Image (cartoon, coloured by chain):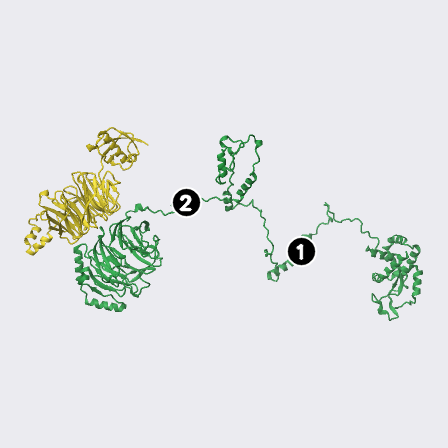
Amino acid sequence: MKAKKRQFLEENTSLSLNQESLFPSKGKLDVDDEDSSDESVVESSDEEVLEKETEAKSAQTIEKPYSSDVDDDVSDDEDLRNTVGNIPMEWYENFPHIGYDLDGRTISKPIRNQDELDKFLDKMENKNYWRTVHDKQTGRDHVLTSEELQLIQRLKKGSFYTSGIDPHEPYVDFFTHEKMIHPVTNIPEHKRSFTPSIIEKRKVGKLVHAIKMGWLKPRKPKTDESEEPKFYDLWEETESKTPTNSELARQKMAIPAPKTQLPGHEASYNPPPEYLPSQEEIDKWKEDDEDERKLDFIPEKFDSLRQVPQYPTFIQERFSRCLDLYLCPRQRKMKVMVNPEELIPNLPKPKDLQPFPTFQALCYKGHKAMVRTISVDSTGQWLASGSDDGIIRVWEVATSRCLREITTLGDQPVKCVSWCPNKSVCLLAVALENKIVIINPSIGDKLIYSATDSLLQSFQPLADEETTNKQESEKSNAVIPPWKTVETGLPYQDGQRLVITHPKDVSKVTWHAKGDYLACVVPGNGHAQVFLHQLTKQRSQTPFTKCKGAVQSVLFHPTRPFLFVATQQYVRVYNLVKQQLTKKLMANSKWISSLAIHPGGDNLLVGSYDCRLSWFDMDLSTKPYKTMRYHKRAIRSCCYHPKYPLFASGGDDGNVVVSHGMVYSDLMQNPLIVPVKVLKGHKVERNLGVLDCCFHPHQPWIFSSAADKTIRLFT
Amino acid sequence: MAQIQVKFFTQQKKYEVSEAPFSVLGSVSGSDLCDLINKLRLEQDDESEKKSFDFIVNGEFLRSSLLQHIEEKGLSVESVLPVEYFEAKESPELKSSLSENDWISGIQLNKQHILTGTYDCSVNIWCRNSETKLATGLAHTEPIKSIAWIPSFGGENDSNEKLASTSQDQKIVLWDFDKEKNSLRPKFSCKGHSRSVESIAVNSKHETFASGSWDCTIKLWSASYVPEKGGLEDEQISSASKKKRAKLEQTGISRVPQMTVAGHTEVVSGLVWIDNNQLCSGSWDHTLRLWDMSEGKETSQLRGTKAILSVDYSKLNQTLVTGNTDRHVRLWDPRSTGSVVKSNLTSHHGWVTCVKWCKTNSNLLVTGSLDNLVKMWDIRSTKTPLFDLTAHTDKVMCLDWHKSEVSKNKIWNLFSINCNLFIFK
């Protein structure tokens, strides 16, 4: 018991400061405690008594402040309340007093002269020693009353300050969870509560104004959604949505899985005997490859269903069937309903477009080198040809008989021959080296060829013309080729009548349709690449002071005063009367080789070394109306038939391609072009095939000359 | 296989067999029937020789099996089919060849001589028996294009033969051939054409001849060798000086045409007289025109699709034949108009340059082509010719033939580039 007391005391002493802080200004305790403590000590000495006492007195505790006040008044003289406050009392160590009382009088330090022995005796003898506390502010000892002790105990337990509070008394909620029919207060709501708050209105008004003025910025709406992960509801509204076209199509095009074949009689456990295979068939079945077998099992006969063994490959088959169903993609094959023949343009059959040349009728043999050029007489009786061996031959068309052989000096290759289209003269223009030789082959009508000679002889150059010629030549700064008349000797007997000498080699000669003018190409002669010669006046001129590009070919328009000049990529159409460029045709090819004009004059054919043959409708456009690629190699020549709706091209692949080219007089209708025949027969020598081709003037026949030294007639 | 009842008959009495109908298989061909006939003949007469026969069913040669032939013709298989047979002609053999210096452009036979015109401007006469060249005439300056005999009424007894030649030098020369002296002299030089004269045809009365030219006209000339009294020709002789007379000897007296008819638009390549007045002309303008030469009028026109190279007319069957530039030989009825072709003979591979009827057999004709072949046709067999004569090594440009009354056919024809004339027997 004592040990307990001691312990408690120690604890109390340790709490002494707390006690001071707990009761800072309750000096009244001291006096009261003195009295009551005496009583309590008398009354009870053990704890049980103490507790009973506290319980008994607990009822009075509420009214204690009042009683203490009363006590305070009663023991006024003994009230030693220090007014220095909660300060460290060491500050008063050197003073005789320890503070001031309520009246301002000093509180003198109590005289403590107890030595250790006294303290011990006191400890031994004094019953209240354990509940005696030293009050530093007053310097006196204070004996705790039992109430104070109980309070200390409660506080130590963490319980309430006063003892009368029950923390576990039943809780009565003011508002209940049950729905009540009556309001908590039945006071009718004030009228004010229905009117909008003016303060709020003002506040809102201020905010609105601030926002308007831009002082206050409303909070930005949340836009940054990418930061948050997105989630989609896969199955959202799938059923309610109307299906799109592609979905509908997919549903429509759904292909059901192929059905397995139903078992037949041979699959029965007791098949009719005709389904049972013989031993040979079984052996054959075993030898065959799995793919070749008709059945993938051997039909067997069992007496009863009971004896049928388990099907050994059942699971395997199911498995392969499943694989078939989901691994094999099923796709509807799009059947092309268009008949491929309908895609081909509806061209008339070549059979209906007759006549056109179909087979080789004659072969004109005699030249010893490649035949570069041919030309048919306007009557259709004679064919002139020029070869690299320097010989010009005139053939009878009907029999392939060579009737005239005109040799030229030097055996230079004959570049071009051309019959004069005028039927009242018999003249052949030949391009040879740098000369154009006008030859009278003295063939055909005697009257005509003798008249031709006399016509040429009767020419008398006028003196003033010569001077103008000179002037012109000075003006144009180009050499005007001199004309020379051949009058005697071997060349005359050979038929040579006139020689026009050019500064460079002549590559091509063409006549105007009336037979008076002829144009020639002199490539590589600077700007003067084209020369025009007039036969009746024996005059020459260079129509162009400037020539862009290398001139490949020239051609007269059959009826109008136009001259076509083909350079490597363009065909220029010049009006000779107005002396201006009227059109520039783009051939869409790299190197033009030949030109031909339709007898009507509105359509032009352009062959090129890059295998293309272009048909120009000059009313339509400056670009080709149609480009044909029927040759495998370079096109060397092309021509129109003067009467039949035919045109042809000859190329280095040794073929002549004949096409039907109908030009309608109705301007709205485009020309009809149908390839009708590929004429083969010429051999390709040294990569050269057909070099020239031309139509018979009256018959649907075509002549072609080639590098194999022959001329062939196809009819 | 269907059985067909056939009945054989012939016009050659020596090969006659019984007329009793036979039942033969439908698949039999000509050679099987030939064996049958030979067996039948053996039964009748033990000494009969084996011969080969040709069969005609419904007017056409049997070239395929009998059943096929019947189906093509649409005949009944049920009834008895009359089959005509006759001895097959033996293929002519090459007898000899004559050589000229240049291409031969025209050839014509008469009983004793062969007349040729060549590209070296000469007219040559050969003897048929000895096959030697008798005479050469040089009056043209350009290649000869065609030649023709002008038969005289005196026949063979006449000491002189008359002939005409046309040339590219626009002239027609009438020659006089003295059989005894073997000399050929130009008598008349017919001038009037402005271009090469391509064809000539002598009237059946031998009084006039017609010529066709590249100037698209046909001219009618007198064939008389007596100079016209009181006309230009007489004047030429009478007024000529000695020098001129000598020149006339070389070139002949000039003659002018009696009549000129124009209508063709291209060269007149073939001419043939149908009767004494009616002339048929073929041209490169694809037409055959019939002319009444007494009036000089065109009577009718037959329009083809290809240029015509040669024309001939058979008096026996009144049919015109043309050689065309498209490999076909066409038969025409001169009484029809328009473009009705009687039949096409198709086997050549090149232009058919010359056609000639047989003068004694209405069914036979010979054609020559640029494909180096001469073919003999029976017009009852349109797809296959009777024979191919393959001696030529170059283009055939003209031919003539004469079937003698004796037994064998003689075909004379000509070959161009190697200048050879082949004689077949």
Q: Quadrant of the image for the C terminus of chain B?
A: top left
Circle number at residue A481? none
Please identify the quarter of the rendering in which residue A122 is found: bottom right
Q: Chain of mark 1?
A: A
Please identify the quarter of the rendering in which residue B152 is found: top left
Vertical placement of residue A638 versus B270, above or below: below
Please state which of residues A302 and A556 is positioned toward the viewer in this rendering: A302
Would residue A360 be visible to someone looking at this image? yes
Residue at image location 6% in from the left, 49% down from the top: B230
- Tell whether B4 sits left or right of A266: left
Callout 1 and callout 2 share a chain = yes
The x and y percentages for residue A188 are 71, 49
* Picture colour for chain A: green
Most distant residue in the front direction:
B47
Circle number at residue A197? 1
- Tell whether A115 sits left or right of A477: right
Q: Which chain is yellow in the picture?
A: B
Q: For the residue carrying disc 1, how many other residues have a C-alpha within 10 Å: few (<14), some (14-19), or many (20+)?
A: few
Mark 2: secondary structure? loop
Task: Give the number of the mark in front: 1 or 2.
Answer: 2
Most distant residue in the bottom direction:
A94
In space, the residues marked 1 and 2 are separated at their CA atoms by 82 Å
Mark 1: secondary structure? loop
Count of number-bearing discs = 2
Q: For the residue carrying disc 2, how many other residues have a C-alpha within 10 Å: few (<14), some (14-19), or many (20+)?
A: few
Most distant residue in the top direction:
B20
Please state which of residues A573 and A44 is positioned toward the viewer in this rendering: A573
Please state which of residues A289 and A512 is positioned toward the viewer in this rendering: A289
Q: Chain of mark 2?
A: A
Q: Quadrant of the image for the N terminus of chain B?
A: top left
Amino acid type at image mark 1: Ser
Q: Which residue is mark 2?
A: A338
